[in-house]
Image (tube, rainbow, N blue to C red):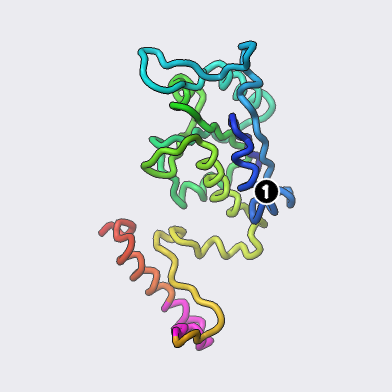
Amino acid sequence: MRIDIITLFPELLESPFGASIVKRAIEGNKVEIHFHDPRDYSSNNYRQVDDYPYGGGAGMVMMVEPLDKCIAQLQSERRYDEVIYMTPDGETLTQPLANRCSLYENIIILCGHYKGVDQRVRDHLVTREISLGDFVLSGGELAAAVFCDSIIRLIPGVLGDESSALSDSYQDGLLAPPIYTRPANYKGWEVPPILTSGNTPAIDQWREEQAVQRTQRLRPDLLGE
């Protein structure tokens, strides 16, 4: 997978992509991540990429021309499955959406800033808009980092145990069941005996029951309740 990120502040993404699973995915050639500064595509001598909104109002707006030129340059080099804009009013990121996006070969991610981007970018260049939830961040970089992590970990060969991702919350429409590790008894806090029984079918059934119970208690909306 190749991910091209259009951002004014690539330094905000250096840390998330420089450690842990994403770093290993990059080093293992499972994913390529490239940053592109829209200032490099500005026709203004001052490399200006933002301007005041028509009609007045507070804040600045990212201009259409630099973003159009940047996206056009990338699309002239390869085919992209999606041009994704990270925005609070987009489609909410869910596990099923992450699953689908993890199958893409090439994607462009546009990180907005200031008051956002000129609407013409969204109307004519962007193919999908994704939100992390009903709240606003200072820019799209942190949202892009979260989105990238959610899809990169699903690429075959990225996780040490590929079956691990299949047992995550939301993969089957349920929250994950409780998990425990050694010691079996700590300060009198005991691991459920079923988990140390060695009875795999019974353990699987217990986990399924726990997943349903936890979902009913914490996220009944996932069950349509």
**Residue sitting at 60 percent across and 33 percent down?**
9
Above-or-below relation of 186 to 115: below
**Residue sitting at 44 percent across and 72 percent down?**
178
Please name the residue that numbered disc 1 is placed on.
18
Q: Main secondary structure of the magenta part?
A: helix
Residue bounds of the magenta highlight: 189-206
- Where does the image place residue 190, in percent across and percent down from the top left? 45, 85
Q: Nearer the viewer, residue 144 or 138?
A: 138
Q: Nearer the viewer, residue 56 or 215?
A: 56
What is the count of numbered marks?
1
Above-or-below relation of 132 to 153: above
Residue 200 within the segment the image draws in magenta: yes
- Where does the image place residue 12, in percent across and percent down from the top left? 59, 39
Q: Amino acid at mark 1?
A: Gly
Q: Nearer the viewer, residue 107 or 115?
A: 115
Question: Which quadrant holds the N terminus?
Answer: top right
Question: Which quadrant holds the C terminus?
Answer: bottom left
Above-or-below relation of 157 to 101: below
Q: Image check: 154 left or right of 193?
A: right
Q: Element under label 1?
A: loop
